[in-house]
Every structure is written in structure tokens, then in C-alpha cells.
Amino acid sequence: MALRQIRIMGDEKLEKVCRPVKAVTARERELIEDMLDTMYDANGVGLAAPQVGILKRIVVIDIGEGPIVLINPEILETSGEQTGQEGCLSLPGQAGVVTRPNYVKVRAMNENGEEYEVEGTELLARAICHECDHLDGIMYVRYVEGELFDVTEEPEEEE
Amino acid sequence: MTKPVNIRELALGILQEITEEEAYSHVVLREVLEKYQYLEKRDRAFISRVVEGTLEHMIQLDYIIEQFSNVPVYNMKPLIRNLLRMSVYQLKYMDSVPDSAVCNEAVKLAQRRGFYNLKGFVNGVLRNMARRLSQVRYPDPAKEPLHYLSVKYSFPVWMLSKWVAQFGYATTEKICRDSHMEKGTVVRCNLQKASREEIIAELERDGITVREHPYLEYALIISDYNYIRAVSAFKKGWIQVQDISSMLVAEVAAPNWGDYCIDVCAAPGGKALHISEKLMGSGYVEARDISEQKVRLMQENIERSNAINIRAVVKDATLYDEESFQKADIVLADVPCSGLGVIGKKQDIKYKMSEKRQTDIIRLQRKILSVVQEYVRPGGVLIYSTCTVGADENQYNIKWFLENYPFELESIDPYLCDDLKCKTTSGGYIQLLPGVHESDGFFIARLRRLEDEPAYEEESWSETDEPAYEEESWSETEEPAYEEAERLGADVLPYEEPVRFRTELRNEENRPETNPAYEQEKQSESGNRANADWEPSAHYEEDDGMLEAEEGIEYLD
């Protein structure tokens, strides 16, 4: 398990548009492994490569139903609307209210380089949008309605 | 992206703290809601409702769970146990939450909290339950009356059996039923600041429903408001939130112009303030309590009332204060108690109390009594009160007290309205029962110190001495003690002969095996709740501390 350092808002890597991945090699697979480890360690539900300083179009997501790896994700379809609070590992301790589509369909490659489609609603839809935005240098704070507020993460009790 | 706040997970966390870590429900809930102030009102209301409802019906929920699970509730992992409890509550009592959502969210939550392998169990139990909830068979009131009461109203059997022995079955059921009723908030009008009519008019202008309380003319029952601090009559200091039973304490104390009073367990100060009002600025009230925090709370309340003849000080009621020796005209001993009279407001009390704990509390009560009786001047008055129900902490304590100290009970009839007068009030005390009286469960006794002390009464106590009651047989021999209490003037069996309850039940047509009344009642209850916009007790979480909230068992910690 290798943890990478999560970049905090203000880091210029978070403001760049990332390059598409041409081929999924051992390097990418190692990056994906590390991203998942880093995400779980930070108690997140999603992480994009620029958040660990790599400008590649790769995101990992796990909303509690198993890991999802999206390489070169492309949002095909969205519908509906959900408004709720959102936070980001690159802006720890804060959250804000963001409106996102309630349904998202995305096409991407998995860690084996195979193309597939993922559909998500509610939290998964929100996470897909949030992470894909990172690949274009966009932080969620751009969309926040009202003020950001402080949140302190509950320490997770594992049994 | 970070994990969003999951309101069910928050509710589960609160329940864990309350049921597994002995935290007090109103404290934990208040802390969490304060921390997550940014959550939407709807989400906050959901959290309060699920937590309070689950606690309110916990024994019943456990009973239902055990109809569908091979694993008994006490054998489950605590987290799974509480997850199931709150899920069943939503299935049974919250029509606004679809069954599928309850099951799915519970399964996800089990997984998130590291119980991947129990996912299937949670799913199976809940889906089964969602389908067959209406077919659950409840205990038969004719065959197992105590078990029936216990499951229907979620009261522990040991408590019920004590009450049935003392009050009879029908009254016990009334007490239990009452604890599940929605009630208005009782407020005391400060008639020095405004007339009753002015206050009622002011409240009604705010759209508040006002009802007059039958027991005291300056007590009003208010409902349909969100937040007491926003009520204009409250902001002006015209009203204080206080249960009727606490108001009766000042009535029964009946201070005279210029009296010196000590309230030895005063926080949050409602009774002491009431006395100070009754003194019309004369005399002096010393409101004592054990901790800085409680005294600070009282100080705030005193400041709001602008009273000049009252002071809050930190003093432990179990430690003798030499300076107060026989100084007081009136001593109020509203002692820490098991709080069984206010279960309707704090549901977790009924699960946290045990006979053993009650024994410890009784020891503390007697200790306090033995100390504070010293402060009463000869001919002065000691008011003993508790917010609990049952002879152990009330009549038996009085009996013990009279045997050991030079006091006598004095009739309280002159201070009560006709509705409240009964055999015991002329004897000097009253046990208020929720569901029977329009009040919390409460006990008040008025004791007067004899003018000339009997010679034997020199002994008593020194700082380190435990009071002499230990040789007493009050705990071992229940039955004779009842008799003795009765001789005292107590009607320990005032309502029904307990033996009669079986036949009585059979005669009542409304609850044979099928129990249609049972379901109906539940439905009407959930209906009422729904109307309240998921905010059944918003006023408790935001009260000004003048409720009896800070009293009772908390003192022990």
C-alpha cells in the first residue's frame, strides 16, 4: 500500500486540464492502486489523479459499493437534479451545498483498458460529476450555493 | 470527494452512544444537532425523530426483531442491534419513509461500518419484517399481563411489577400510556410583570395555542410553537417553562414575607425563582447546586428574571454547611432521583434505571436529607420532592426520615386546588402520577421541624458518618414496609386491588388477541407525529433549561 500526498486547493495541479491516457500500462495500474489506497485512507468516496499531482484523466470512486475506476471518462448523459452538501479531500474540513444531476451515464476504460459504461444516481452521480470536474481543473467550490461551512470528520469506528 | 454526512449514520451513532455508552439522550442529541447546524431542517428533524422514537419504543422494537431473527437481540453486535432497532422504528412508525429505502439504507450502513458479512442478515431480517409486520403477534394481555404492558409501552418488567403492586394494573397502564402522549409545554406566568389576560393575548398573537391549566391559575399549557426563545412573551420574561408539578413545590412551600429559603439542589433554578417571586422581593433565596456549570445555568435564568432576592451558589448538598445551621425558614430538597416521573420527556431513563441503581440513589437521597434537615430552624419547613413515581424513593424515605429526625408531616390541603386533594394530602404529601394527574410524575411532602427538639435528637451525624439507615430493613422487607407506609397515611394501594386486573381485562372488549385497538392507537400516534412536521419535540432540544431537564439522575455523575 502506497499512499500519495493529496494536493490541497491552491496547488496549481488542481487547476490544470489533464491529458487523456493513451494506454493503460503498469505505471497507470500502480497509480490507480495508490489512488485507491489514498482515497480509502483519507476516508473519501472519490479521488482524481490531479489530486495526487498527476495530470492524467483517471478517477477512482467508491461510495461503499466497491471500487470503480474510470480512465478517460466521458459523461454521455445526465438528467434530474439533486441539491446537497459536498466536500472534497483537497479542501479538508469544509463543505458546501451543490446542485448536481441526479442521474449520470459515463463511458470510460477500466484498469484493464477495456471500455465500459457506468450509470449512477444520487451519491454515485454526484461523485462522478465531482471527480470528472477535477480532470478539467474545476473544484466544486465554483458551484457552491451560499457559504462554505466547517465540518469535522467523525472518526470512523471499524469493528 | 469526501463522504457526505449520512443522517441515518448520525442517528445510529447517537443511538450507539446512548444505549452502549450510557450517555443521556437529550445531551447527545443536542450536541450532535448543534454540531451539524448546517443540515437542513428536514434532516435535523429526521434525526431527532428516529433517535427519540427508537428509544421510546425500544422494548417493543426488540420484541419485533426477535420474531424475525434467530439471534436474540442481546447477542447481536451492538451496531447491528441499533441499526435494526432504528430500521424497525422507521418501518412501523414512519409512513413517510418507504420500506425499500429503510432496507437499502440499513444494508448500506451495515456495509459502510465494516459489517460486510452481516449484510445478508440485515437485509433478510428487514425485508421479512417489512412484509409481515402486521402479522406480528404481541403478548396476550389476559395470559401475560406484565409482558403485554412491557411490550406495548416499552417499559421494563421490574418497574411495571413494582407499580402494579403499588398502584394497580389500570393505573400502571395509564402511567405507561401517558408517557407516549404528545403534550403541550407548561409555562408559569410571572404575574408581577403582566396580567394573565395580557400574557394569553400576547401568546395568541404569536399564533400559539394556549390552554389554562386546571391546577393553578398562573399556569398555561402552550403548543404549536417552534422555538421558545422566539416567543415574545418569553423574551419579555413574562413566562417561564416549568412543569406544573414543580410549580406546586413553591405553592406547598408557601413562603411568608421575609422568609429565608435554601434550595439545596436548585438547578436549573425554576423552583427557587418561583419562591423568590412569591416573596415579592422580600426575604432571600439561596439556590445551591453541585457544579459550576449548573450554577452558571441558574445564574442566567436569574438574570433574565431580574430578581434581587435570590443568589446562585455552588454547594454540594451532601456536605454539611455549618453556617446554615438552623437558619432557614424553608429548605427545599428537590433531590436527585430516578426520574421515572419524566419518562415521557426523557425516554432513555426507563432503560438506564435498575433496582441496583435505584438503591444507590436512595442512599444519596437519605444522605442529602440527613444533612440538609440541619438547616431548618425549629418550626421551619422542609419540602421534600422528587420527579419520580413509586414508594421507594418517596414514602419510604419520608418514613425513614420521620423515624430519625424531629419533624412531622403537615397537611398540604390549604395549598392545593380541590382536584388534587386526597387522603394523603391532608397527611402531608402527594404523589402525582402522569396519566392520572395532568402533570409529570412527582412527589411532594411538607415537613415541619418540631419547635422543641426531643432530647434524644442530639446524635445524628458527623461529616464522615453514613446516615444510620443502613441497619434499616427497608430494602429486604418490602411487604411490611408497605404496610407501615400505609399507617403513615399513605395509600399505597389507592386505586385498584392488583389481584383484580385479570378479570377486569377480560371484561374489556377492546383488547382480545387481535388487539385492533392496539394498531389503531399506533396509527393515530404516527398521524399526530406526521402533522408536527417531523419536529415532535423541537422545544425540548431548544428549551431554556427551565424544564426539569438538568435534574434527576444526571446529578449522580
Image: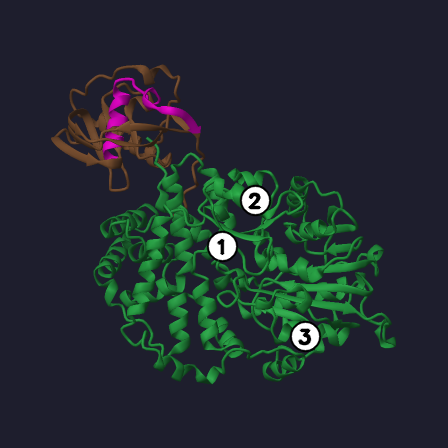
Residue tagged 3: B427
Which residue is nearer to you in this view: B396 or A9?
Answer: B396
| Chain to which the residue tagged by mark 1 belongs | B
Q: Badge 1: how crowded within 10 Å, few (<14), some, or many (20+)? A: few
Residues at marks 3 and 2 touching, judged by CB atoms closer than 8 Å? no
Residue B113 placement (x, y as % from top left):
35, 47
Q: Which residues, given as a range, are shown in magenta?
A: A124-149
Q: Badge 2: how crowded within 10 Å, few (<14), some, or many (20+)? A: many
- Is residue A137 highlighted in magenta? yes
In which quarter of the view is residue A109 placed?
top left
Q: Which chain is brown?
A: A
Q: Which chain is green?
A: B
The residue lying at 57 percent from left, 46 percent from top is B197
| Chain to which the residue tagged by mark 3 belongs | B
Residue B123 placement (x, y as % from top left):
24, 55
Residue type, label 2: Ile
